[in-house]
Image (cartoon, helix red, strand yellow):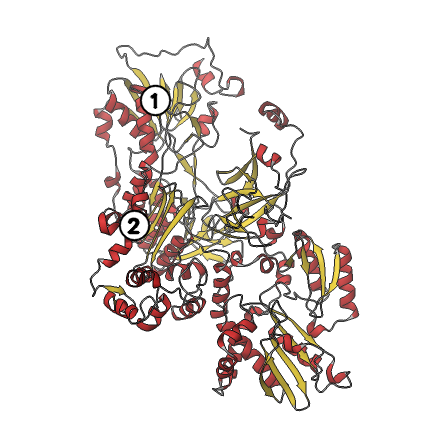
Amino acid sequence: MASLRLFSVGAQNLGVPEVNAPNLVKIPEGDLRERLVVVGNGMAGCRAVEEILARDADRFAITIFGAEPRVNYNRIMLSPVLAGEKQFDDIVINTDEWYVENDITLISGDPVVAIDRAAQTVTSASGRIEAYDRLLIATGSEPFIIPVPGKDLSGVVSFRDLDDVDKMLTAAANGGHAVVIGGGLLGLEAAHGLSLRGMEVTVLHLMPTLMERQLDEAAGWLLKSELERRGQTILTGADTAEILGKDGKVTGVKLKDGREIPASIVVMAVGIRPSTALARQAGLEVERGIMVDDHMVTSDPAVMAVGECVQHRGICYGLVAPLWDMCRSLADAAVSTPSGYTGSVTSTKLKVSGIDLFSAGDFSGGADCEDIVMRDAARGVYKRVIVKNNKLVGAVLYGDTADGSWYFDLLKREEDVSDIREALIFGQAFAQGGGALADPNAAVAALSDDAEVCGCNGVTKGTVVSTIKGGACSLDAVRSQCKASASCGSCTGLVESLLKLTLGDDVKSGPKTLCKCTSFSHDDVRRLIVEKSLKAIPQVMQELTWKTPDGCASCRPALNYYLLCAWPGEYVDDQQSRFVNERMHANIQKDGTYSVVPRMWGGVTTPDELRAIADAADKYQARLIKVTGGQRIDLFGIKKEDLPAIWGDLNAAGMVSGHAYGKSLRTVKTCVGSEWCRFGTQDSTGLGIKAEQMTWGSWMPHKFKIAVSGCPRNCAEATIKDFGVICVDSGYELHVGGNGGIHVRATDLLSKVTTEQEALDVCAAFIQLYREQAWYLERTAPWIERVGLDYVKAQLFDDPEAVARLAKRFHYSQQFMQDDPWARRAAGEDSELHQHLAEFRPFPTPLSTAQLKEAAE
Amino acid sequence: MIGDWIDIGPTTQISPGNARTLPVQGGEEIAIFHTLDNQFYALVNKCPHKHGPLSQGIVHGNVVTCPLHSWNISLKTGEALGDDPLERGACVPTIPIREDAGRLYLKRDALVSAKAPEAMA
């Protein structure tokens, strides 16, 4: 009778206790204790039992069921076991003797498969039935297996228990390649272990930065560089399509972008999810995890749950520290005075030897939060703390985690940090040094004269101070006169303090810094990107000690351009750092629609092109068709979602993007020249087309316009363009720095050449000089006024080889840039940028939960 | 609980630093942001200034810069962050969003009732 009911837990008795159910014998003869059955012999289950025993060792007769055929061990130490730093015996928490001494019945290797709440019994896989007065579910969590083809091949393992470790060790014994899917805490620890065991390891991570749940972009980047330095291959943004195999055994992993990585073992470490099947089957209330109250009691008062399987106040935890808090509250409620669990603040450390990494609390920042960032590039240290309402709410430490526990303590105690705010980032010793040391300026004042301020250039405090006294009144002056802070910049704060201490209010601010996120000017940033071989935005921000975690809307686009200009062919463009027009390859208009301009080489078109433009205007309902000042046709009012299709149609008619939206070469305006005009001296249309074919697609500090006029009547208005050519009988006059903008500026005459090729060479060289030296968002007119025409002439013509050298660099970078962005988007690249997530249609009146359930059935 | 939160799909459909949009029939278009440090936010997709599509702006920290006139809007509170008298107090409604088991949920009633402020003249 009883066993029949046990296996028929179905909808009919979900959550409804059967009042007249036959009661199993509850109290065995001679034992008056309540019976506590624990499902799960892991860290949470055993810890809860320990806490209960500590309060009242005689209260319960305890039986523990475990799925694994072994005693309770410390699962979080599996990483050191894999890495060979520890043995299994080292990580056992409770030995066989502990179970015996405490009179606990351990049933290991025999998982519980059903709970009958009405009869208050559990049944194990082997058919064993155990009655309980109190039941504790501590089933933990299970690894998440991504549902890709090949996931069931032999050699695909998770990283959850000792069996998984054994499989990895067996694979490692044969050497070869290992692929770890998942660049979170667990995945990186698995990768580290396999790497130490001699395997070639590749980590595949879906997100752009490692451990994105715990680390910000900068710390994630440092971690990636360090792991790569150790020989691991880290592929971020890597989306697994399929696990490849042969004869039932894994041979590699195929990514959605087509890349294939060989592997003799694949470790899936993409995450865990609460193990709730048993509780769900028993009709307990389960959302993501088993729902528990502050006393760890489930929807059934006789059933408690604890650990990674539970959901408390909406949160499921995947770390060990909250388990301890939960177990204390559970034991308090079950045995003594209820205390109530209110949730945990968690912190994380990466257990990879030699990499110090700590993360705690909320580091998302925001408007009401203050971010304090310290980057010490020379030592490879990155620290970031977040203060909100005078309290520490989050911390990320990389490279030096000595103060992690201090920050975590401040965070948990919600202590007011306003008194030590200034020195908080320097750590406990400094912040609590009290008195003078709590003020960074005072700390700098206390330094001796021969203390080294700038490690890169070996400059002492005494040298800096005498430089300042000698007349250097700004950061920039100090940098140029004694080199302090001129290299990596990590001592900039110190130099600024010294300026303030020495001069008081007489400190002059230097040339405009790139933005408020840095104390470096545009020129410094450009120079250091090249000098220090910086090749990614997070790297620049780390090495040049940026003051914000990921920059702002001013510096991100500037850095993206500077990197692109310095490392053509190497730098991978960062879309998130581009203004919307360049991200969408169209011009945003005031109503949020876009306008589209196909390229019209030298202003020349054909009836077929005009027909295609007219057809596209009809098809996509352009609300205005306008001829631009640059001799092209602009289609207005195109919807974001229609952009790929209209580009596809225009591409099909042979037209490419006109870059009318970009900080790039826009248009080459021409007149008809000697071919048609009775005054024309040279083929200005032909030269214009050649110039446009040479320069299209090139990203610049700002928009760039060219014009070619066939005679000095200048019908193409070449003297208000960035680069203008006036054709004359004897050749070509080359003009630069014109601008029809807010401040109209006519061009300066740069030089005169006799052949078309020379005109094109000087054009390429001039553009490259501008690309390499101007500040982002500085057009040629203000640039030339700032540096002087003589400087530009000297750069181009003093050295007879200069034009050829600059032109060569221009042409080199053009081979990577002359790639029609419309074609790629029309072919489907980044299609999600143009699409809505979904459309939401609300019901006229919200349905009740019961109605929704009914609708679902 | 089911009726209160609307599942709008997996977190992976919005890459960090990007935003996607969700039109609401009879209501406002919502912009859902994924910041570089992996937080999610949802706001009415209209800058309080001239109704620029915030989803198209550059995201940095927990701020988005509107693509039309570079107003900085807090993703957490929807407030304009500038000191200009015009910007002070200007605000766009935010929608409570939560992440659970790799999926995103928006608060239903806030989603339906969200109204954009009048655009400034």
Note whether A803 is above or below A234 in the view shown.
Answer: below
Mark 2 belongs to chain: A
Q: Position of residue A857 (x, y in %)?
A: 62, 26
Nearer to me, A581 or A776: A776
Depicted A106 relative to depicted A767: above or below: above
Disc 2 packing (10 Å; few <14; some 14–19; many ≥20): many
Q: Chain of mark 1?
A: A
Look at label 2 and name its amino acid. Ala
Residue type for callout 1? Val
Q: Is residue A132 visible?
A: no
The answer for how far apart the CA atoms under marks 2 and 1 are is 52 Å
Pick whichever, B28 or A25, lies toward us.
B28
Which quadrant of the structure image shows residue A762?
Answer: bottom right
Residue farthest to the bottom, as pictured = A730
Asked if residue A166 shows in the view, the reply is yes
- Judge by depth and name the residue closer to the eye, A197 or B47: B47
Q: Are marks 2 and 1 on the same chain?
A: yes
Instruction: Tell me the residue that label 2 is attached to.
Output: A423
Q: Which residue is found at the position 44% from the left and 58% from the top? A: A516
- The residue under label 1 is A37
Q: Which mark is residue A836?
A: none
Measured as percent of width and height from the top left, residue A404 is found at: 29, 46
Q: Nearer the viewer, mark 2 or mark 1?
A: 2
Q: Quadrant of the N terminus of chain A?
A: top left
